[in-house]
Structure formats: C-alpha cells, structure tokens
C-alpha cells in the first residue's frame, strides 16, 4: 500500500538553502550539527573522504573512483 499523498508524487529534494528561506532557526541548528554532514557529495568536496583506499582488501569489489557519497 502506498501512503504517499498524490501531491507529493512529483516532489524532489530542493536543497537545504531552500529550507532556510522559511525555517531559519531550524536551519541554523541543523547546519551546526553533525547531521548536516552525514551524507556528503564527494564530487563537490573530495576532502570528505577520510578512508585510506590504498589499504582495501584484495577482494574488495569497489574503488574510490566509484564512490559517490560519504556517510557519517
């Protein structure tokens, strides 16, 4: 059963700066929390990768080039 209202079917993420327009205080608290850094786009800031990909096990089935986001 799909409980999502029809009005939300075409909804998409618009970014935190859009939320800030109406929710300034909440956005300020969120920005200064670790929650705002939970998922980061590696293409926008490669420095968010802290793992040492040179030490992956030989049977690893991924590479740094395939990474898109960091989590945590």
Image: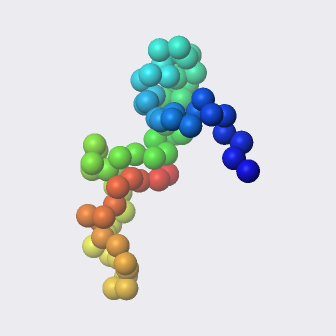
Question: From the viewer's perspective, is residue 27 above or below residue 55?
Answer: above
Residue 2 shown left or right of residue 52 in the figure: right
Question: From the viewer's perspective, is residue 9 above or below residue 21?
Answer: below
| Among the 4 quarters of the image, the one containing residue 49 | bottom left
Question: From the viewer's perspective, is residue 21 above or below residue 8?
Answer: above
Q: Residue furthest bottom?
A: 59
Q: Nearer the viewer, residue 59 or 8?
A: 8
Coloring basis for residues: rainbow
Q: Position of residue 46 (x, y in %)?
A: 27, 50
Q: Position of residue 22 (x, y in %)?
A: 53, 14
Tell me which residue sits at (40%, 45%) in the image: 40
| Among the 4 quarters of the image, the one containing residue 63 | bottom left
Tell me which residue sits at (50%, 22%) in the image: 19
Tell me which residue sits at (37%, 78%) in the image: 61
Residue 29 shown left or right of residue 56 in the figure: right
Q: Residue furthest front?
A: 6
Q: Position of residue 3 (x, y in %)?
A: 71, 42
């Amino acid at each position: 059963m799909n409980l999502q209202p029809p009005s939300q079917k075409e909804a998409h993420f618009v970014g935190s700066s859009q939320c800030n327009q109406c929710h300034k205080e909440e956005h300020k608290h969120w920005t200064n929390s670790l929650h705002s850094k939970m998922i980061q786009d590696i293409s926008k800031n490669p420095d968010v990768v802290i793992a040492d990909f040179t030490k992956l096990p030989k049977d690893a089935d991924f590479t740094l080039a395939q990474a898109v986001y960091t989590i945590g």
